[in-house]
Image (tube, helix red, strand yellow):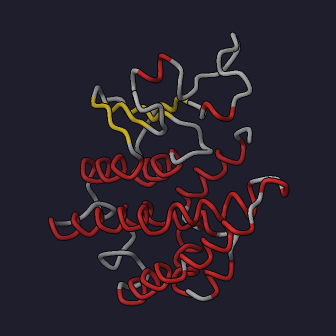
Amino acid sequence: MTLTIYGCYRSRATRNIWLANELGLAFNHVPVIQVYRLPDPNAADAPLHTRSPEFLKVNPNARIPAIDDDGFVLNESLAINLYLARKHGGPLAPKDAQEEGLATMWSLWAANECETHALNLSYHLAAYPPEKRDPAIVAASLAALPAPFAVLDRQLAQGGGYVMGGRFTVADINVGEIIRYAKPAQQLFDAAPNVKAWLDKLHARPAFQKMWTARDAEAA
């Protein structure tokens, strides 16, 4: 049985690699890079990228990550994590149908309520060079995120410091990897102390640290 994860570390593939580390899964890593990061994706020496014909056979949507789990191909990072957790079980997986519903709900909640705004903060406060940063986008995201951060803060307070089940699960990885994008805006975390403590706790986990070390070693 062979699991292959397609995608570079500087992408949403981090979610799947972190979970694989937590589960102790052996996997092959195929470093597919986003096509927009290449000056000439058609160059003879261009690396494997999201528009490469070889990768389009895996994901015709031209997006990373994707997995091939012994012939079963799956796209979308959050769905991949829910699948891997269900398949391999253990305390990271939902224990029953209700927790499965909660894990799905919180994953979709984070994607719908937080991800676009959190990414905008990551780009326009840190990742982009100063000339590309847009204060209006920053202001809009800072206005939009306090409400969902408050929702998550209350959930963590009521749930023993985790998203569901009073324990660390796949839901924490899925939500945490989205909330991480907002870290350049520390004022959001200052106003949501349970979110800050939770994310710090997640990032102290050895499986996260292993993934992050590999990410730091990858070319920007």
Q: Residue at (47%, 31%) from the top-left corner?
A: 62
Along the horizontal axis of the image, is 116 left or right of 138?
A: left
Task: Say which quadrant the N terminus sits in.
Answer: top left
Task: Say which quadrant the C terminus sits in.
Answer: top right
Q: Residue 182: give x, y in percent of width and height.
A: 61, 68
Q: Residue 22: give x, y in percent of width and height.
A: 44, 55
Which residue extends farthest left?
97
Along the horizontal axis of the image, is 100 left or right of 44?
A: left
**Quadrant of residue 120 within the rendered picture:** bottom right
Q: Residue at (60%, 63%) from the top-left corner?
A: 181
Residue 82, relative to residue 97: is it above or below? Answer: above
Q: Residue 101: give x, y in percent of width and height.
A: 22, 66
**Total labels drawn:** 0
Along the horizontal axis of the image, is 184 left or right of 25?
A: right
Residue 155, relative to residue 3: is it above or below? Answer: below
In depth, the one of 3 and 176 nearer the eye is: 176
Q: Residue 205: give x, y in percent of width and height.
A: 54, 64
Residue 147, relative to residue 94: is it above or below? Answer: below
Which residue extends farthest front?
136
**Quadrant of residue 121 within the rendered picture:** bottom right
Q: Residue at (65%, 15%) from the top-left corner?
A: 42
Which residue extends farthest top?
44
Residue 126, relative to residue 86: is it above or below? Answer: below
**Quadrant of residue 32 within the rendered picture:** top right
Along the horizontal axis of the image, is 200 left or right of 104?
A: right
Q: Residue at (40%, 27%) from the top-left corner?
A: 60
In depth, the one of 102 and 188 nearer the eye is: 188
